Amino acid sequence: MAEHLSQSELDYPFKLLEYLNGYRVSKVIFAACELGVFELLMRSPGAMSALQVAEALDASADGMERLLDALAGMEILQVETADGTALYNSTDVANTYLARGGAKSLHDMVAYHSQTIYPLWNNMADAVREGKNQNQKTFGIPPGEVFEAIYRSEEEMVKFMGLMNSSWNLDGQDVVTAFNLSCFQKIVDVGGCTGALARELARAYPSSSVTVFELPRVVEMARKHFPQENDTFAFHSGDFFHGDVPSADLYVLARILHDWSEEKCLTLLKKLYRACNPGGGVLLVEAMLLENHRGPIAAQLFSLNMLVQTDGREHPPSQYTNILKQSGFAHVQVCRTGKSYDAILAFK
């Protein structure tokens, strides 16, 4: 058979090996974040040996040396040799995105992927067989209780909120400026979690008032764990499925619709349409599939994640356009940002 394969086909096993080893690459980063490697090296006045790092983090010298070498091989850390000893130093990338606490840090996102998403994905084959999320098998939560699984403890709530915070620290500016939203004076971010996206909205449109509409317990956790001085947005407590929503000129639904069945999405959008001020609209922020569902790979992986964790899925633009129109919205506009998340704007 091999003689009939093209060169690209002959080379493809090496691509397969990259895919097969993908989880190992992820776990190197997960472990380094969990152990505190990046914070230690960022604070260190100089490069450190594997033994010094191991002693500071209560780890084995052999294991730490292997981990640090892998991080250096991935160009996340720098390594040099002095008197026969390897010395490791941080990089701007590690300090900016992987050390805890920075404005652009993805540390909370890494922790959530490691401790929550990764265990769910261990049951991917069962999710495909059964066509339902794996919260019960993984965490003992019934399949229909999606947010009971996500918010099953204060610790889990904070991890999830950290994930959302990290996402908008990275992509928030791109999605809020995908369209010119300056014509909307009153903006409500529905299910806006920590307020990270609302903060980007307030920065981009300082003449607009921005409100985060969230569950009371989420608002409490946001104020407790993600406080920001001089924030230019407000919180409004409520339940967007089971209560009234505040009136607005623009409703923002960022990574909300992909969590739910189409029936629930229609229910929510119809409620927002009724509450929306005349001439107002709705902004959807989601990772959109291509119309044929054959990409982008990031959106396809997000959709699989919705299978193992929620009752929803990712959609192509036509599907979002269809449910928006069924809900009463019109003049639908689509913007692919080229980043992780895309935007759709529709008007009442």
Image: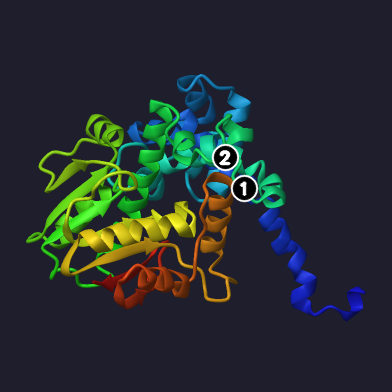
Task: Mark 2 and mark 1 in contact? Answer it, CB < 8 Å.
Answer: yes
Q: Earlier in the sequence, mark 2 or mark 1?
A: 1
Q: Give the residue at x 57% y 48%.
A: 73
Q: Give the residue at x 18% y 39%.
A: 228
Name the residue nearer the viewer: 325 or 18.
325
Query: In this rendering, is residue 46 above or below 93?
Result: above
Element type at marker 1?
A: loop
Q: Position of residue 277 (x, y in %)?
A: 16, 64
Residue linked to disc 1:
132
In the displayed structure image, the side of residue 264 where residue 66 appears, left or right: right
Q: Which numbered marker is on residue 143?
A: 2
What residue type is disc 1 on? Answer: Lys
Q: Position of residue 324 (x, y in %)?
A: 36, 69
Q: How is the image coloured?
A: rainbow
Instruction: Characterize the local packing of mark 2: few (<14), some (14-19) or many (20 or more) Cα atoms within 10 angstroms.
Output: some
What residue type is disc 2 on? Answer: Pro
Q: Give the residue at x 36% y 31%.
A: 44
Q: Position of residue 5 (x, y in %)?
A: 84, 78
C-alpha gap between disc 2 and disc 1: 7 Å
Query: In this rendering, is residue 88 above or below 342?
Result: above
Name the residue nearer the viewer: 268 or 189.
268
Instruction: Characterize the local packing of mark 1: few (<14), some (14-19) or many (20 or more) Cα atoms within 10 angstroms.
Output: some
